[in-house]
Structure formats: structure tokens, C-alpha cells
Image: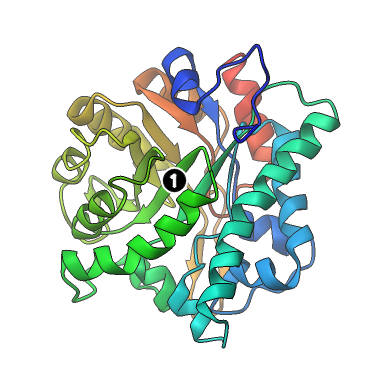
Amino acid sequence: MTSDTLSDSPRTLADALATGTVVLDGGMSNQLESAGHDLSDELWSARLLAERPEAITEAHLAYFEAGADVAITSSYQATFEGFAARGITPERAAELLGLSVELAREAARRAHAKGVSRPLWTAASVGPYGAMLADGSEYRGRYGLSVAELERFHRPRLEVLAAAGPDVLALETVPDADEARALLRAIRGLGVPAWLSYSVAGDRTRAGQPLEEAFALAADAEEVLAVGVNCCAPEDVDGAVEIAARVTGKPVVVYPNSGETWDAEARGWAGRSTFTAEQVTGWQRGGARLIGGCCRVGPGAIAGISEALGDH
């Protein structure tokens, strides 16, 4: 079963969103780091696709066991260009992209074998162009590329990921409405639904565009089943949920960071977590239907979200 659902449950993620709320997983990198893996590399967690794939499966499994319904694959920073810089051929890069989906599905199979009885889905992560650059521009946008150039960058790996059979494509941490335009063009005809999730600061994208304009790009896109935000402060979520629901009429997806801040010079996290599971009920009331966490949000927090949402 490509969606790893159970026979008496919703068969697609869209079916589930029509009747309730779905819990997403948390941060892949923090879960891998907590297991002792070094991710100080430009490929980040994508490096483990080649070196330690079992570690990725275990990370997904930890989130499923904590209460997540959806595993987001480790392909966020996996690109043909990024792999090529490490001497990996296009053929091997395509294999690794496909493997990211299979590892998440394998984790779902293991979770079901261990007694998890709810349906589980796989979201193939598609990070922004800036993630490949690994220079922080994924949080700024404005790369100096045209929409057409960005579409040409994204389309090949989208084709490979879609062919691997995920339940949804996660177009995530998008900092710029221009890149969203490119991604919305690039997913046409792939036959796999997608969600579009921006990285934001307040009521604007990281590139400075008003969220009303950014979300509106996806309002009429049939391929897009949800729109929202991720990799942002928890405090930015409430306003984004209201805007996304009002502008698009679609289910809203939210998975913020813990609230800690990244110190680039010290290469570490600073401050304290402001993410609490209790916040999610307000997001749910506002229209959020896919709710989870991003950086520094681990299985414990996902268990809290699942508990806060009850039967979803």
C-alpha cells in the first residue's frame, strides 16, 4: 500500500483533512543529532541517505511512535546540484532521493508492525533553492534568479520524488513568493498533491512580501491541498493561520520551530523554547489541519501535540 493506510481508515491525506486534523512530525536534524549523528555538513541530514539510511528510518519511527501521522522525508537539502558537489552522479542522486521516500514508508510499516493502528503518510520534502546553497539564503530569498530559472532547478528532483510515490510533496520553508510561483509551476502534471509552506517573519515572507499576496498564489492551484508556514517562531503562527484560511479557503499547514534562535557565529541554538503543545488547539480552531513542529521540536513535543488534539 503506497500510503500505508489501514483498510478501514481514510485512504488519502486529502480524505483525512476533510474530516479532521493530522499530526506532522518534528525536526529531522535534531532527532538525528540526539542519536549522536554529526550533521555539520553542507548536505545536512541528506548525507545520511548515503551513509546511514537506517538512522533516518529510526528517526521517522520515533515520531510515528510519538503520535505523528505524517513523516516528512530527509530530502530537504537533497538536490542534484548539492550531491554533484560531493562527487555523486545524477543517477546515484536520483536513487538517494527515491530512497528518502522509501525510508519513511519503511518506518510506517515498522510502526504498524509494532502496533500503531492509525493510518500513516509520507511527505516528500522539497526545500528551497537556498537550502542547496547552504549559506543562509533560504531565510532571505531574493536569490537573483528568475521564476523560470527556479522552476528549472526544482522540476527534476520533483519528478524523481513524485515517481517514488509519496502521499504528498512538502514544498517547505519557502522564503520568497517568486520561488513559490516557480514551485507551483514545477508541480504541474506530476500527479501528486502538495502543500506549500512559507518561512515567515511576522505577517510577511522572509523576502518581505505580504502573506496575503504570497498565500493567494496557491488559492486556485488544484494540486495544492494545504497552505501555511513552517520553520518560524511559534508566535508568528496565529496570524498566518488566519490569513491563509481566509485568502485560500484551503486547510492550513503549520509546523513552527521551538522558539529558540540559531546563533550562526557560535553554530548553536540560544534562548529557550516557547513552543507549547497547548498552542495547537488555537491553531486548529483557526483552520490548521496539519500541525507539527520543525527545528528543535522532538518526539516529546509531538506526543504533546497529539495528546492536545485528542482524536484530531
Nearer the observer, 87 or 30: 87
Q: Position of residue 228 (x, y in %)?
A: 34, 39
Q: Amino acid at mark 1?
A: Leu
Q: Position of residue 281 (x, y in %)?
A: 48, 21
Quarter-of-image position of residue 95: bottom right
Residue 141 visible in rendering: no
- Number of numbered discs: 1
Nearer the observer, 63 or 73: 73
Classify 161 as above or below 135: above
Give SS at disc 1. Answer: strand
Residue ID for mark 1: 169
Q: Position of residue 303 (x, y in %)?
A: 68, 32
At horizontal 35% and vertical 68% (from top left) the residue drawn is 129
Residue 101 visible in rendering: yes
At horizontal 69% and vertical 71% (from top left) the residue drawn is 50
Classify 302 as above or below 22: below
At horizontal 57% and vertical 31% (from top left) the residue drawn is 277
User: Is residue 266 toward the left or the right of residue 169 in the image?
Assistant: right
Classify 133 as above or below 273: below
